[in-house]
Image (tube, rainbow, N blue to C red):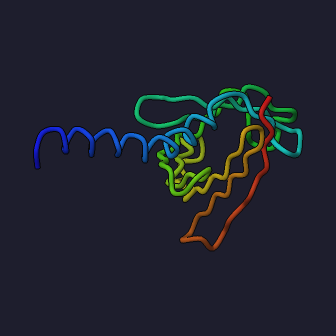
Amino acid sequence: MPFAGRAFLGVGLIFVAAPAFASTDLIKGSWSRGDGLATVRIDRCGAAMCAVNTWVKDPSGGEKTGDRLVMSISPSADGKLAGTAYDPQRNLTYQIDISVAERNMKTRGCVLGGLLCKSVGWTKR
């Protein structure tokens, strides 16, 4: 393949991949959990994304400010991310699916091969 053809192919791949990378950036920021009991800040932490509790209404349920979730996620479709999330406080790894739009996000985490799952809605602050 001539050099010009390879360069065009490379630029084309960047444009095709751009929407997928944008969905990862959409989860960055501060999010309020749908039940109003917690707020998290999501940002890069090395190669992963981390969600850190910045506010928890009632820490007696086991969650506290500063707890974090380390997510190894990648785009799976437009506006969707999938991968794993590790909770070092509980030493648990979840399969995680995230659907994200500009101001809303829904997370679904599962353990035990998908036998136990929980979905949570979030609103960007």
Q: Nearer the viewer, residue 9 or 121?
A: 9
Tell me the residue at 11%/49% (across/down).
Answer: 1
The picture quadrant where one finds residue 35 is top right
Quadrant hosting residue 3: top left
Residue closest to the eye, 115 or 73 = 73
Residue at the image position 68 percent from the left and 52 percent from the top: 107
Query: Residue drawn at (73%, 46%), measured in percent from left and top?
Result: 105
Q: Quadrant of the C terminus?
A: top right
Of residues 86 and 25, the one nearer the viewer is 25
Residue at the far left in the pictured view: 2
Residue in view at x 40 percent, y 34 percent? 47
The picture quadrant where one finds residue 53 is top right
Q: Residue 26 in the image: x percent, y percent?
A: 63, 36
Q: Is residue 10 left or right of residue 38?
A: left
Q: Is residue 53 left or right of residue 113?
A: right
Residue 4 position in % (x across, y down): 18, 38
Is 24 situated above or below 83?
above
Q: Is residue 19 left or right of residue 99?
A: left
Q: Is residue 81 above or below residue 52?
A: below
Report the front residue among 24 and 56.
Answer: 24
Residue 79 image point, x, y percent: 62, 50
Q: What percent of the width, then of the height, locates residue 14? A: 37, 40
Count of number-bearing discs? 0
